[in-house]
Amino acid sequence: MSIEENLNKIKNDISKDITLVAVSKTKPIEDLKIAYNLGQRDFGENKVQEFIDKEESLPKDIRWHFIGNLQTNKVKYLVGKVNLIHSLSSIKLLKKIDEEFAKKDCIANVLIQINIGREETKGGIFEEDIESFINEVEACNNCKVKGIMTIIPKGNDEENRYYFKKMKIIYDNLSKKSYKNITMEILSMGMTHDYKIALEEGSNLIRVGEGIFGKRNIIGGLTNE
């Protein structure tokens, strides 16, 4: 199927209040332009240099999402350019984001990545560390948490639903509390092969790459879309 056919199919599956992030990592600018011309505005990249190259070459009304593992020495390149950082996964990274965005008097919008499956191969904080992590966020001046995200373990539909339900409970509990730097606006979970179940369990942001742009070569066996 073409990019147009894929995009139309997904948009028919989701309501207008769902944010669809087109995961465009490794894909050529020409493919992004096709999706852009079809009305897509949210794009996700996971490598800083690739993001910079594409950001400079594409229309300025694109909302860029950084979805990959973010090294502290690369944070400075995202300041003022990225709409949302999805992968806030450590206190060290939190402090670096706050520091670098403060230098240019910018606010960093971020999602706390939760390792709901407790997998060693994936980033994110564990459920029991959320409260202490939030205390660190509250001490920041230039970092605003807009929600939470996860990449669940690979499994069948029942297993996927189990993890999505756990995330929704965390999201709902955090939504009931009042913070200075934290608002629960985004529950990001669900990718190409499981987004329908994620939506059923309360996700309001999905990341789809293969389902829009077709298969890609996956290095190291890991993907985040």
Image: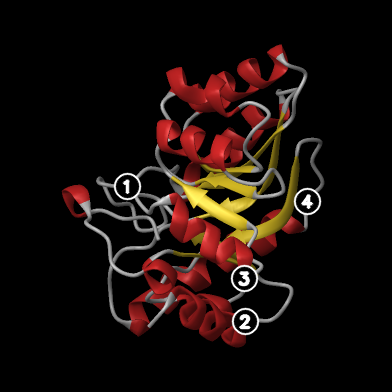
First-in-chain label (4 vs 1): 1
Residue 66 horizontal side relative to residue 62, left or right:
left
User: Residue 70 in the image: x percent, y percent?
Assistant: 44, 33
The disc, 4 or 3, on the residue closer to the chain's N-terminal end is 3
Disc 1: which residue: 122
Question: The residue tagged with tag 1: helix, strand or loop?
Answer: loop
| Disc 3 element | loop
Q: Which residue is mark 2?
A: 14
x then y, percent, for residue 36 = 60, 61
Q: Is residue 23 visible?
A: no
Q: CA distance from mark 1 to mark 2?
A: 27 Å
Mark 1 or mark 2, which has the lower sequence index?
Answer: 2
Q: Are marks 1 and 2 in contact (CB under 8 Å)?
A: no
Whichever of labels 1 and 3 marks the residue nearer the N terminus, that label is: 3
Q: Residue at x 57, y 35 (%)?
A: 56
Residue 223 sits above or below residue 180 on the image: below
Q: Type of residue at label 3? A: Leu
**Coloring basis for residues:** secondary structure
What's the residue type where badge 2 is placed?
A: Ile
**Residue named by callout 4:** 177
